[in-house]
Image: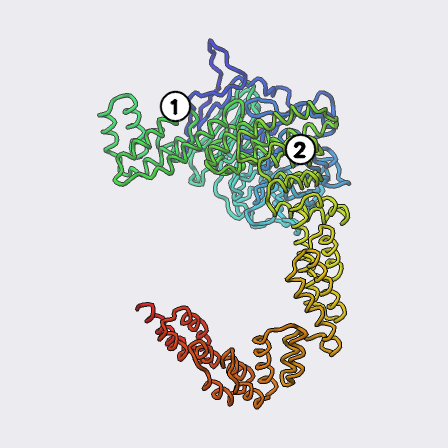
Amino acid sequence: MRSSSRTTTPSEKKPRLDGEICLRPSSSVYLGDQKLFFTQEYINTCSLNLKFVVQFAACQFSGPIACAYSPCPNKWRVCIRTISGRMLKQDMAFDNAVFLDWTRAHCLVVLHKNGRAQVLSSLGEKISEVDFDTKMSDVHECRTFATSRGDSGIAVMDVDGQVSVVNSVSEPIIWHMRPPYTELPTAWTAFQPHSQLTHILLIFEAVFLMGCQGESLQVQNHASVWVDSTTRYVKCVVDDARSRIAMMTENGKIQIVSIDLSTCFCTVEIEDHDIGKCINFGWVGNSAVFVQMSPSLIVFVNVSARRKPGDEVQIYEKMTANAKISIENDGIRLFESTQVEFVEAASREKIAVLNRNMSEDGAHLYKAAQEMNQGTGHNSFAASTVIQDMYKAIDECISTACDMWQPEEQKLLLKAARFGMAYTNTTPDTTKLMKAIKEIRVLNELRMVRNGIPLTHRQFRMIGDTCVINRLIDMGSYSAAIKVAQWLGGENTENVDRVLLEWVRRSIGKVSKTGIKMDPLALKALDEKISAKLLQFPHVSMADAARQAIESKLPELARLFIQRETDDESHVAVLLQLNDVKSALKKAAASQRPQLIHQVVRHLMNSETRSNFELAISQIPLAQCLYQDLVRQEGETRGVSGRQMLALLEQASDFERQTLFHFDVAQTERNPDERLNALRRAKDAAKSMGDKAIEEILNDVSAFAPLQIQRGQADMSVRDTIIEMAHDTAKVALLKQQARLNDKQVLLWTIEGLAKKGKMEQLFDLAQKRSPIGYAPFVKACVRYKRMDEVKKYYAKANGYPDLVAANIAMKNYVEAAKLAYDRRDREVLHAIHMKSHDDPTQCPRVKQLLNSLDQN
């Protein structure tokens, strides 16, 4: 099959705008079992100015294009535009540049003759630089290749045949490979198979050498089963899936082989064209290749694996006007002097629906929608009744709608899908339809001239939402990026925030890079411009804009931003970044939020001397109080921290806290003299505080302490002292008088001391007298110190409900104690006994039973 077509722009009365999007129906042509669609994306694209281009490169996934012009020898002037012709960067000058290409990460690579590569953003800003080899001879050729990480690598061959490679432009680690021959290869390429190392393929006429990183080049003898040794191979290109390689020989043969060169899937021989002298060669989708014979002629060839030996060669010749070609994963884009055209291999669904194949359900559903749209409802019903699988037909119409470029066709196909849902037996699932509507809306917005990103649906699905938004940000299309982020994100504002903050960063960065000091009026104008935009989005913090200003060394602008911040925590954090501690402290104190004051205090402690920050917080009572607590928690009450805490308390005349501070020292201090001094200081603080009761208690304790030191009992408390001397009634009486203890306390400690010392006779004599505190303490003391023979003696003396309950609990007779409480209907005591009885698993259930019985009554 052979045909030819020359596309022209129709004359119209109303002139179109430069780069206006073309919404005319796409043309198509069959190429054997493949069908190619030709879609004019933009017309009247005179601003592309391709006539005098010496080097052309287009970014994959409908990204920007870069055109290099050479006004004089060894000098390039490079311009970056969108596909629709909108200028992004112009007149970038480069000396001795030899190669231009885009990475998948949206970066432009400019390679110089000496092997030095510059990596630029889509706005022409320098990102990095890669020096392949300081001793490299002149560059001969260069290849970019896709990596498994979604980035791009570069392989550079010099005139001596050495290949220098970086696996990733963003992380350039250079390695080298040198072939064993002195002559240059007739064809070569670099590629990275999935989950494998980068491979270099060098072809010397009909000899294939391949090697990967860390290995030497090896002759691929297994390729001899399909290699045509009577000719030489002049081109080789890897497909987008990195699973096949298209080979071209000088005598017009095209072979499709596996990535490891072990299998040949298809061989096509072109006799009518001398394709070995072509100027460009590459893939169109998965089953077709193009051969650009000249700027005005492109030959499309079917290389489907379904072809059998002897089948007729299926080609299609297309005439163009000085076309430049960029290769996409699902087709190619032709840049001509007056238009941009996209050539794609159509999907099965698109072919089925648009060709009205009577064996396809999607075609019947599309026809039914067209009939309904024309008002012929009876024909519409007739078309819908022959559909076998309505769900399949709906999916085909949705898929085709996503692949269409004209809004009218998109609407009609979506209407067909919605029409089909009315004929389903179950409640239709509209998830796919709603997702398709959202994605079509985004694609139509991206294709507008002002954006110039004519993504196909397959390209959009491959790179994803985040990458699309990133590309809009890279190109400075912030309004479109926000719009797309809102459509795709719904209630999720993460991407919107990211776009806004990047716009703020770049807006502030433009000002800071000038190096010119801005006057207050200019700063205020910039503040109002940025704030007016950010205040439209309440979920975006003005503090983030202030931080960007601080990073750009514009503190005055940051102060203007932060005045509009309503969140106190963010406000304080930015003030601390500005090192305006005084304002931060006032803001934190005014917010009445202790954690903010803690934040400021800690910042002061880490950045200022102690005298400075103590002076700063002395004017704010709440800050001073929190600072004291902080010192107390961190430093305990000893050493430098203890002295610091005491100094703060004395400075604030906080006598109550001073008293407590000295109490803590007296409790933890092991030196008797220091303990005594701490008690005396506590007494003085209590006196200054005016608390007579505490002063009297401390007066008694401080009077008792010297006598303890004299007796050699400085490490013992009053309780321990009485327990130790319980058998000596005279000394106990003296201690009682010195410490001013009450009778009950002395009696309890005496009982415990006699039981501890084993003075059973003396303890029994004490019990012979009527005990004012009952006999439960005697039982408890005997149980505690394992005097089990004496327990029953004192248990028999126990009298009265409280005493008997306490005695039984002390003996761990929980059931007996519970019975006493149950008889008295004393639920509170019974509940307490039940809690204690958990220590004894045998008694606990019986106590629980009594408690439940009491609750039921």
- Label 1, residues with CA under 10 Å away: few <14, some 14-19, many ≥20: few
Disc 2 versus disc 1: nearer the observer: 2
Up the image or down, 583 lies above or below 852; here it is: above
10 and 629: which one is in front?
629
For the C terminus, which image quadrant? bottom left
Which quarter shows the N terminus? Answer: top left
Mark identifier at residue 348: none
Q: Amino acid at mark 2?
A: Ala
On the image, which quarter does residue 280 sit in? Answer: top right
**CA distance for labels 2 and 1:** 49 Å
Q: How is the image coloured?
A: rainbow
Front position in the image: 268 or 331: 331
10 Å crowding of disc 2: few (<14), some (14-19), many (20+):
many
Ranked by sequence position, the earlier of labels 2 and 1 is: 1
Q: Is residue 755 above or below residue 569?
A: below
Q: Looking at the image, do the residues carrying marks 2 and 1 touch, with CB atoms under 8 Å apart?
A: no
Q: Position of residue 724 (x, y in %)?
A: 65, 81
Q: Position of residue 361 (x, y in %)?
A: 30, 35
Residue 558: mark in rendering = 2
Quarter where residue 596 is shown: top right
Quadrant of the image occupied by residue 181: top right
Question: Camera-side residue: 436 or 109?
Answer: 436
Where is residue 590? Give x, y as percent: 62, 40
Mark 1: secondary structure: helix
Q: In the rendered structure, which amino acid carries the disc numbered 1?
A: Glu
- Considering only vertical position in the picture, is 684 above or below 624? below
Is residue 830 visible in the rendered structure shown here? Answer: yes
The residue labelled by disc 1 is 408
Marks counted in the figure total 2
The answer to whether residue 282 shows anywhere in this view is no
Q: Position of residue 819 (x, y in %)?
A: 37, 77
